[in-house]
Image (spheres, grey):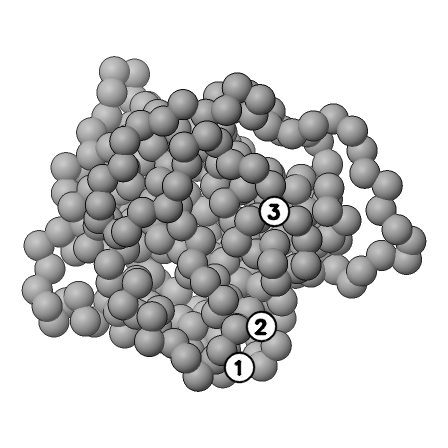
């Protein structure tokens, strides 16, 4: 979909925030005990988060501290990892939108880590093989561009979260209920992302693995069936944290009971979160 139209085109503002660290206000899933970090601490890690309205934090106040960055930032604080988020997120855009912008983002901000979560707005539900191949090349080019420009940056692709394919009563989040084509498209997108990334070998551990958002169930989506609820963003934050934790040399954290990865396009049943996490 083009910016300004379709699925999440109502909000079409790039959010770029530099020099801001996520505050340690305790999210619903977190413990309240403050952590005493050593002084002097480790160097600050700059994290560039790239995507669409899901990355911007559509069901929250869209800012550097919104969306999955709230929980991710809190967990990094608890692990004594000083950090700074840069947010490049535009509602309604496809992965193609970032093709001409990735070079500028990397050279301007010089991030240590890049987390990419795009593809929800790429309608591949009835795509031809040529169109799917073109998507794979576009997705791969995002990584080629950044990794070639900065020999130190580390990147993480993401499998997109599955939407419900419908809205429920009371759906008010712009631009309304998720289109019926979305779930079928997301499965194709995730398969294409897998193929695109599975061929990366020349960069070694600079593309360590995927962030897998596929197993977040429908109950963690808003009433329009597309964007995560604040509790859903907490789950996303934990999934992102656990994915980058080995690179940062910090311990991983628990996930909701029953939350497991799955192959792209394969169904997974609903599950009940751990009571201890108190999500939603």
Q: Count the marks: how many? A: 3
Residue under numbered circle 1: 149
Residues at marks 2 and 1 touching, judged by CB atoms closer than 8 Å: yes
Q: Secondary structure at mark 2?
A: loop
Q: Position of residue 195 (x, y in %)?
A: 27, 68
Q: Residue at x 30, y 62 (%)?
A: 193
Residue under numbered circle 3: 252
- From what the image shows, is residue 33 above or below residue 63? above
Q: Residue at x 55, y 49 (%)?
A: 242
Relative to 82, is 119 on the left or the right?
Answer: left
Relative to 221, is 239 on the left or the right?
Answer: right
Q: Secondary structure at mark 1?
A: helix
Counting residues from the N terminus, which is met first, the one under dot 3 or under dot 1?
A: 1
Q: Position of residue 139 (x, y in %)?
A: 33, 68
Q: Position of residue 211 (x, y in %)?
A: 44, 53
The crowd level at tag 1 (other Cα within 10 Å; few <14, some 14-19, many 20+) is: some
Foreground: 180 or 61?
A: 180
Q: Residue at x 38, y 76 (%)?
A: 200
Label 3 to label 2, Cα distance in Å?
22 Å
Residue under numbered circle 2: 153
Residues at marks 3 and 2 touching, judged by CB atoms closer than 8 Å: no
The crowd level at tag 3 (other Cα within 10 Å; few <14, some 14-19, many 20+) is: some
Which dot marks residue 214?
A: none
């Amino acid at each position: 979909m083009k910016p300004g139209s379709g699925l999440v085109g109502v909000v079409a503002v790039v959010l770029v925030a530099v020099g801001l660290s996520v505050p340690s206000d305790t999210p619903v899933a977190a413990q309240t005990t403050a952590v005493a970090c050593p002084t002097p601490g480790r160097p600050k890690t700059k994290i560039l988060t790239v995507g669409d309205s899901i990355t911007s934090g559509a069901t929250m106040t869209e800012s550097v501290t919104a969306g999955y960055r709230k929980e991710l930032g809190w967990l990094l604080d608890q692990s004594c990892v000083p950090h700074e988020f840069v947010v490049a997120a535009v509602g309604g855009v496809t992965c193609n939108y970032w093709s001409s912008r990735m070079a500028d983002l990397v050279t301007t901000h010089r991030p240590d880590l890049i987390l990419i979560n795009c593809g929800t707005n790429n309608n591949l539900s009835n795509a031809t093989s040529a169109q799917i191949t073109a998507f794979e090349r576009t997705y791969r080019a995002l990584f080629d561009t950044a990794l070639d420009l900065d020999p130190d940056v580390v990147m993480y692709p993401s499998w997109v979260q599955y939407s419900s394919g419908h809205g429920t009563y009371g759906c008010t989040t712009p631009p309304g209920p998720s289109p019926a084509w979305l779930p079928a498209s997301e499965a194709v997108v995730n398969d294409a992302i897998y193929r695109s990334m599975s061929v990366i070998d020349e960069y070694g551990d600079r593309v360590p693995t995927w962030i897998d958002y596929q197993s977040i169930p429908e109950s963690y989506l808003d009433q329009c069936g597309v964007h995560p609820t604040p509790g859903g963003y907490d789950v996303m934050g934990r999934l992102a944290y656990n994915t980058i934790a080995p690179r940062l040399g910090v311990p991983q954290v628990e996930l909701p009971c029953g939350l497991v990865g799955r192959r792209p396009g394969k169904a997974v049943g609903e599950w009940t979160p751990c009571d201890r996490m108190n999500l939603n």
